[in-house]
Amino acid sequence: MFDLSPFIAYRPLQLINDGRNSTFLVEVTKAGHSELRRNALCVLKIHQASPPDVSYQQERTANSLLAMSYTNPLLTAAASCEVIFARPCRKSIKARYPQCFGSVEVPVELLQAAMEERGWVEPDTGKENLFHALLFEYIPNLEPLMPKDVTPAIVAETHLVLKTIHASNVCHNDLENFRIRPEIGFRNIFIQQYNRNVYILDFDTARIVDYSPEGQRLLEEEANKLDGLFQIILSGEDPRKRFPREVLRLMAERQMQQSG
């Protein structure tokens, strides 16, 4: 994965998420060409830790492996920049996760100032307080997958997307929303309602496995756990039946403590 910092200029348009890792919708152009009309919308995910924490390394490694599944590997930084503006077709189910174009060193204070003024962040500006970030393809009209969206067709497509990810020996490791248990909820699985395409995002807790029986077992367990959630939804069964009564009581107490 290449450092694109010297090659691109960008300006933030919208703060998408301000959690542990800030995510911005940004307009990107080639450095020194911010007045030209050849630009693209991308997602800039900033890991707010210096030096980079484990989640950044996990996400960087996972996306490097996933990039190998694309038909045109990014062999140089210049090639990565060209792909940013190519606006690839997203019909293939093998690419139902955002393509990571490369890494960027982000001057956070300058980024915030640019956000307020709608200005451009150019290379070689703001050398201090640099955070590491990853630049992703922007996929519009994504909504979190909800239980009401689940159909047999959605289940089949989600498993195909996950199978493609697993083929790169990447275990996503963050597909269920445990906070709302005993109810069923998903994390990092999204759907485009107008065409019913499923996408899986955010690999900052991913595990890279090998071809050993243990590694392949982790991939199989992830697929089986997700399928178990889908089958409960499709059956109409009360999801609370998954847990013993004592476990449900402890969950309810914890939720009351968190809400209080």
Image: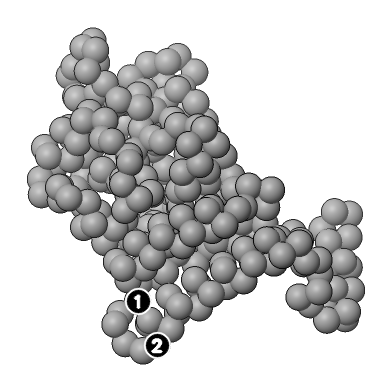
Neighbour tally class for label 2: few under 14, some 14-19, many 20 plus, Cα within 10 Å: few
Q: Quadrant of residue 56?
A: bottom left
Neighbour tally class for label 1: few under 14, some 14-19, many 20 plus, Cα within 10 Å: some
Q: Quadrant of residue 155?
A: bottom right
Q: Position of residue 226 (x, y in %)?
A: 56, 67
Q: Position of residue 69 (x, y in %)?
A: 24, 57
Q: Secondary structure at mark 2?
A: helix
* Identity of the residue drawn at 49% across and 59% down: 156
What's the coloring here? one colour
For residue 57, above or below residue 127: below
Of all residues shown, which one is farthest toward the top?
35
Nearest to the observer: residue 193 or residue 181: 193
Let me know if residue 64 appears in the view.
no
Q: Could you say which disc has been placed on residue 214 in the image?
A: 2
Q: Which residue corresponds to mark 1? A: 209
Of the 4 image quadrants, the one containing the C terminus is bottom right
